[in-house]
Structures are given as C-alpha cells and as structure tokens.
Amino acid sequence: MKKQNELGKKKTKKTWIAYLWSAPSLLLILLIVIFPILYTGYISFTNMNVYHWTNYTWNGFDNYKDALLVLDNGFIAALMFTVLWTVVNMVLQLVIAYVLASLLNIKNLKLRNLYKTLLIFPWAMPGYVSILLWKTGMFNSQFGLLNQWLVKAGFEPVRWLAGDVIAFVCCTVVNLWLALPFMITIIDGALQSIDQSFYESAKLDGAGWFKSTYYITVPMIKAIITPAVVITAFTTFKQFDVIYLLTQQVGAKTGADLHTILTYAYEKAFITNNYGYSSAISILIFILLIGLSTLMNRQNKRAEVDE
Amino acid sequence: MKRAWSALVALVLIAGLFGGCGSLNGKAESGVTSGTSDSTGTAGTNGTDTKEEGPVTITIWHDKEDAVAEVLAESLKTLEPDIVVVLEKKSNMTEALKTVGNDPNVAPDMYFFAHDKIGVYAEMGILTPITDILPAEELSGYMENTIKAATYKGEIYQLPIYYETLLFMYNRLYMKEDEVPATTEALYDYMVENTKGGHYGFIEQHSTPYYAAGWINGFGGSILSEDGVPGLDSAETIAALEYHKKFVDLMPGETEYATVNTLFNKGMAHSTIAGPWLIPTLRDNGIEVGVAAMPVIDKTGIAISPYMGVQGIQVLKYAAANKAEAVEKVLRQIMDVNLQVELALISGCAPASEACYEMEEITSDEVVMAMKETAEHAVPMPNVPEMDVMWTVVGNLLTDVNMSGKDVGESAKEAQKEAEQLIENMQ
Amino acid sequence: MMQKTKNEVGKMNRGKRMTKRKIRQNLILTGVNLFFIILSFAILVPILYALSVSLNAENSLLSTDFSFIPKHLTLQNYKAVFVEEPILIWFKNSMILAVITLFLSLGTGIPAAYVFSRKRFSGRKIILRLLILLYAFPSLLSMIALYKLLSPLGLINTKLGLIIVYTGTMAVFALWNMKGYFDTIPREIEEAAMIDGTSTVQLVLRIVLPLAKPTIVVTAMMVLIFVWNEYIFAINFMMGSDTYTLAAGLYSLQATEMSGSWPVFSAASIVVSLPILMVFFALQKYMTSGLTAGGVKG
C-alpha cells in the first residue's frame, strides 16, 4: 500500500518536473502557435469584415455555410494538385538528398566541406529573393538565361512558366533548389551518426552496398530524420511562395493554372478582406490537413515518430 | 535538490525572457530620440505631446519615389519647430494599414497614396473626412475629377496632390512623330510591320488589369461600376477583350512590369503604354522618349481610356481627433500651389489644383500636359471596397483569354459570376 | 578497411591488387569530384547570375547578352547598398534578433526536447502529436492574431515582440528535431552516470549536449536562417525602416513599379547572404562531429 502510494507520488513528481523543464518552450508555443489558431477559430464565428472591422459580432456558422459553398470542383482539383505536389517534391527531395549525402560521405573526398558549403548556398538567401532571381533571371522568356542558352544552341525560346506541366516542373525545380540544402544537411548529419563498425561487420558477412543500405543505413537514419521529414512535408504542403510568386502573382500571372489549396483559398477568400470568412476557410483546411495526416499515420504505422 | 535546480533553470530562462524585454525596449526607445527619421517617434510619445508644450510629430506613410518624398519633406520642414513631419516609406502599406489603422500606438497620422483604397479604409472606420478638418469651400480650387475621385459615400476623404494615368510613349529613334498611330488599327498595322527579330512594334502589360482597363473602358465596357457592380460579361467588355487579343498575339508572353519596361528601356520596343514613373529611367538610359495621345479605337471612336489615380493625403481618425491643429497645418502646407507644381514636375504627374495650369512651368512641360490631356478621358479608378477583389478576378480573366486561349464569352461569364460571388462574400 | 585487406590478401598478389584497387578508387573519386563540381556550378547559376549583374557597370538584371564575367567591373551597386541604404543598421538589427532568438530557442528547446525524449509523463504523447498537427496550420492568417496578441502588451514595434514571435515559431521545430536526435542516443551512458550520482542538469550539460552537438548545431542553424531570412513579420510588426532587419530592408528595396534598381537589389541580396555563408563554414566542423567522433560506440 505504502509502496504504491510512493510510486504514484513519484510519478506526479516526474510529470511535474517534466513540465517545468519544458514550460518555457511550451509557453512560447502556446502563445505564438496555438493562440493564433484559437483566435482564428473565434474570428471564424464572427462577421469581422471591412464593414464590421471593429464592431464585429457573433454570427454562428454563417461563414462555414458560405465556405462550404465555395469548396467546389476547383477546390477538389487544388487539393489533388497539392497532394501531388507534396508527394513529388518529398520523394525527389529524399532521394536526391540521400544520394548526394551518401556521395559526400565517400572516403577520401578531400573537398567535401567545400562542396557542402556550395550545395547549401541557396539556403543563405531569403526565399523570395531566390524566387525572384529564378523568375526573372532564369525563366523569363525574353531575357532569361535558359532561353539565352537555348537560342545560342539553335533552339526556339521556350515560355517556361506558361503551360501547366512545364510550370509545374519549373516550380518543382525551384522548390528543390530551396529545400534540398536542409534535407542534405539533415541526412548528412544522420549518416555520420552511424557507427562505421556496423558496415565493417556487414562487409565481413558479405553484404553488398544495396544490402547494407537497406538493412543498416535506412533503418538507422530513419529515426533521426523523421521529425525533419514530417515537418518538411507539412511545409511543402503549405508552400505558397514558390507557386504564387512564380506563376500566380497579381499583375504578373504567367498563364499556368496551378493552384494549391492555399493559393486557391487566397484567391477565393483572403482577397475579400472578410476575416471571418477567411478564418472559416483556414479552419476547414486545417481540419482537412489533420484528417489527411491522421489517415496517413494510420496507414503507415511504421513511420510513427514517437515510440 | 534536483527539483530546486530545475526550478532555478526555468526561472533563469523566464527571467532572461523578461530581462531581455527591459533592455530591448530601452534600446528601441533610445533609438527614437537619436534617430531623425524613426517612425517609432509616433509611438507612445505622441498622445501626450499634444497636450504638452513642444513639437508635435506627424508621421506620414507613403510608397513614393525618394525624389518625391524629398521635395515634400523639404516643404514640410517649414512647419518646424512646432510640428515635425516624418515621412516613412512603407513597403506593404495597404496591408499594414488594415492591421494597424486602429492602433493609436503604431498607426501613422496620415498616408500618401492613390484614392482607390478610400472605400476600404472608410468602411473599416480608420479615416476621417478631410472636410472635418478643412472647410469644404477651401477645396473649390481643386479640379472636379480629383475631388470626385476622393469622394466616397458623399464624404471627401482625400486631399488631392496630383493625378496620374498611363501614357502612350514611343521611342523617337524608331517611331517618327508623324508615324505615331492615331488609331488602334494604325497601331496594329505598325505592330505587324515592325514586330520581328526580337523587336516589338508595341508592348504593354497586356494581361495586367490596370493596363488592360484602358481597352475595356475605351469600348464602353467596365471592370466595376462606380457603385460596385462588376461589368465583366457586358457585350462591350467582351468585345474589348476579343479585339485586344490580336494585339496581345504580337507581344511577349510575359505581362509583368520588369519584362515589358526593360524591353522598352533597352530599345527593343518601339512604343508602349506606361506610367510617368518610367520616364526618369528612360532618360537615364538615353532613350529619346516621345509622349503622344492615346490611339483612338476604330470601332468606338473613343481613345484608349486607362484608369486615373489621384495621389493625395488621407488622415487617420486617431490623428484627427488628437492632433487636429497640427494636422490642419500640415494639410494647409500641402495645399500650397508651388509645392504641388514641384511635386507634379518631379513625378511627371498632373497637379490637382486648377491654379497650377496657369503657371508657365506646368504648361511648358510636355509630360505633365500630355498627362492632363490623357486624363480627360481617363476613368477614375473606382474607390469602393469591391475593387479589391476585382484585380485578381480580372487578372485571371485576362490570363485565360490572352495566354491560355480560352473562349472569351465563356471566360467573361465565369469571371462575372466569380466576381459577384466574391463581392457577396465580402459582407 | 585497408587493414582487413592487408590481412586477407596473400603476399604474392599484394602489390598488384593494391594498385588495381587504388586505380579504381581514384577513378571513382575523380568521377565524384567531377560530379560535384558540375552540380555545384549548376546550383550556383542563379547566384552567380546575381553576382555578375551586381558587378556589371552597364547592365540591368535583364539583358540579352549575359556573361558570367562582367564586362565592365564596378562596385557602384555595392557602394549604393552601403551608402544610400541604412544597411548597417539593418545588419545590426538582424544580428541582435538572430543571436537572442538563437539562445532563447536553444535555452527553451533543449530542456524540453530532453524531457520529451527521456521522461515518460502523462500528456507527453498527446502533446507531441498535437504539436506536429498544429504545424499544419496555414500561417497566412496568424498575422492578425499575433498582432492582436502583441499590441496590448506594447510589443509591436519592439525587438522583443519579434524575438518572441520568432522563438515561438521555431519552438515546435526545435523541440521535435532535437527530441528525434536525443532518442537515438543510447540511454545506457546516462544510466551509468546516474548511478554515479550525477544530477540531471549535470547529466544534460556534460553528457547529452556533447553527444547531441550535430543536432544542436543544425537546430541553431535553422533558427538563425529563419530569423535572417524572415521578412513578413518584420515588415508588419516594425513600423519604421530603421527598425527593419536585413531581409525586410531588402524586401523594401525590391524593384517595384516605381522604384528599385535590379543591380542594387542583386548586390544587396549577395550582401545579405554572405554572413550566413560564413556561419555555414564556421559551423561545418561541428556538424561533421557525429556520434562516432564523440567516442561512443553502440
């Protein structure tokens, strides 16, 4: 009896200490991450818009009714596109980053630090600067470097951002350019955390490159890179800048009809200055995202992050 | 022991957070007293300043070129030492005003911008009518079109300074004065003849609403009526879009500012429709630029009629209530005709006061006078809040029609539906 | 590896095999080197482009006959950046924000990540899962909400306001990322130390932190880059251009319809990237010291 009581006490103490240790971090998350979500949820039930900017009142589910009306075929198409965009980008990112990081870890590669720095250079530039550089410097049909090279090689100039498919490829290239430095760094760090003796004993057992990759490298780095990968997946899903700035910017549209759910929501809701309505759309997208990720989590229990 | 230790760590962290707060706040404030152009000067200190002796600070947000801001700042210096005016260039001003407009601690006292946002801000309740500060009679010296543009729901919300519209510009190296097309068909013929080998006869930001509006208006169509009704599926608008298409086919694929203006700037395009702000850069690049009247659309007999924007000063509610006296003085200084002339000449726009057009400096300036002439059939941009959604809808419509080759009539109908839906969702 | 080869291979064939193997290895190395040289160049093309534009006297970003080596070298654009723009003030602002945010992020993140990795307490799993889900919230709308939060506290237009926003934004990442790495550090070492009577704080400082150096460096770098490159909060929550950070200042320099010069903008974007690049270089040796370098063998 006494023992059990003590055990309980010990557990409470443990919980208490754990929360104390994580309090500053959790407090900040509460303020900066959770509060805006709650506030958005609250605003989504009001009529806060241009006409009731300060004197907004509760209007129940009106915004949600309006929002559900807008979630039409266009929205479904945008959602499908967003999923495609996320999958393509994540697969390419992981494969390319893994290959590059493995090559960087080849023995006797003396210049590896130089290569590493050069490869992560894109990371050092603010995202919108890079996107602008790509848009005007590379893809512009009149002055872009790509077309200059094409013309010099005797080909016809190409309108890089005009068609849906080609614009998708261009957006993916830019997104990879922006995101790979992070992924390479993460995977590189993970690869280095693997004890070389594993490989040595695998070699003694006669395992080839493929086998040791499959049985040693991948399982060992999985745990380390999963948090980063999950977060990157969400970031890719939420990616707005690349697609919007390259193809959809007001006054500089290129003719490609690429819409993720965010650029779609932007054009359907945010430009109305109706914050109640936009909030309702945001909350709906949020719920949808949670639904999707829970679904994926359930299907892929092995990718479960925490034990 | 362990517990005490971890509590201590947490405490240190939290203390660090707030300790940082104190010192950083201190830094920010000391910056205010030493920095001259620091807008934080408005923050906090102002509210009390009006009641006390000492200078009142008036902060004006703007998005203008440095040269324009300098002229204005110089003139407003005459109000010192009683009133110190701080001009702050704000990069995302229109969005920032929505966020901070009601916050007396950080909102500016006035802003210097085009009239088209008046409706949004007036409905949000962050603007004060100019007539609350100045008697309406004193505004009688302003041109009628500028005052009309500044009026929303019967109240005048802007003190106009100058107005601007797009101009037909040509490169004298390629296009002689007698070659300047008087009609759009003549322009088309010129384009067919001269668009080759990387050169373009005529270019514009064809799928950008602000630029395409001139064609739509010239056909008697409209993007949005004065009272906020979209007119995208009207027969006139559709006719304009259909007619405009053949011109677009002879222009580059890009519609954005950088491409179009660089082509003209590099002497790769013979003529363009662009804003007066382009002219200083053109002159720096050694382009001999001519300015002409807009070509007349053959079918309607009306010249291409771009939007007109009136640039002026809007006063925020909080400033009007708390610093009425200083605000009035600043406004009166800005009403000075000589200042208007100076600002007009440096920006290449047309001054808003009638009196300026009796002055030699103005009547002898080619650009300003061309501006005034074009503005006579220019259409003032609607200032109703509904306009905010139209830019995107029309942009999509133009892209569909000009770049994706979709059917004009169908796209226009869809865009109209879309616009109506969005406007409904604003409420 | 060499050791083993030596042992396995008979004396007779030794010399021959060695050279063959060496040649093969050298060939692979040359190939890999060549690959990385080409790849680095390809990746750097847009940046070299900006660099060339910024150094070229008569060019704008848009030109029809571009070459990577400027035809008329000039430092005029860089001079413009330093003389006409308050870039040194922006630099100072960015530095202050970056350094404080960095320390706060690690200071709050490390203890949190540690307990979430090591302790089992009620609410742990739920919080972990919740945090990752919250990350899914599109942040387009959080601007207004954060404004409403900071404004009554008087934190708008102060560096502290931005620091709190930045630290909070990166907190989920910091916690998750470091927790993931802590999970892979074998517990046995800590348990051994526990028996020796080391306190938890000492344990973290002396044993866990050195082992977790790579993840701490990566997290720190992420925070630094985020603060350095973030501009949306900075231009919305800071009112005067003197209070801007480098990225926000650069954003305001951006070629807009009426102002802005591409060459100056290119020069500024190079200038902004340099400090981060130097940090990359400086931190690289810490990032490469993984678990093995820490002397721990599984």
Image (cartoon, rainbow, N blue to C red):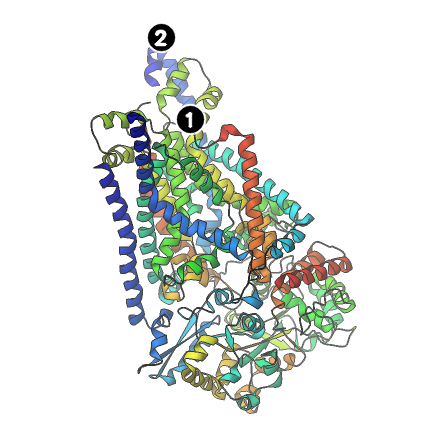
The residue that disc 1 covers is A220
Q: Is residue A165 left or right of residue C39?
A: right
Indicate the position of residue A205 as horizontal and vertical percent values.
42, 13
Location of the C terminus of chain B (image quadrant):
bottom right
Q: Residue at the spot x=57%, y=38% of the render? A: A88
Q: Residue at the spot x=62%, y=49% of the render? A: A259
**Residue C10 shows which numbered tag?**
2
Decide: few, some or many residues near mark 1? Use Cα within 10 Å; few <14, some 14-19, many ≥20. Answer: some
Q: Above or below — where is B352 with respect to A269?
A: below
Q: Is residue A291 left or right of residue B9?
A: right
Indicate the position of residue B226 as horizontal and vertical percent values.
67, 74
Indicate the position of residue A23 as horizontal and vertical percent values.
34, 44
Instruction: Determine which quarter of the picture holds residue B119.
Output: bottom right
Q: CA distance from mark 2 to mark 1?
A: 35 Å
Could one spot residue A132 in this view of the protein? no
> Which residue type carries mark 1?
Met
The one nearer the camera, B6 or C213, is B6
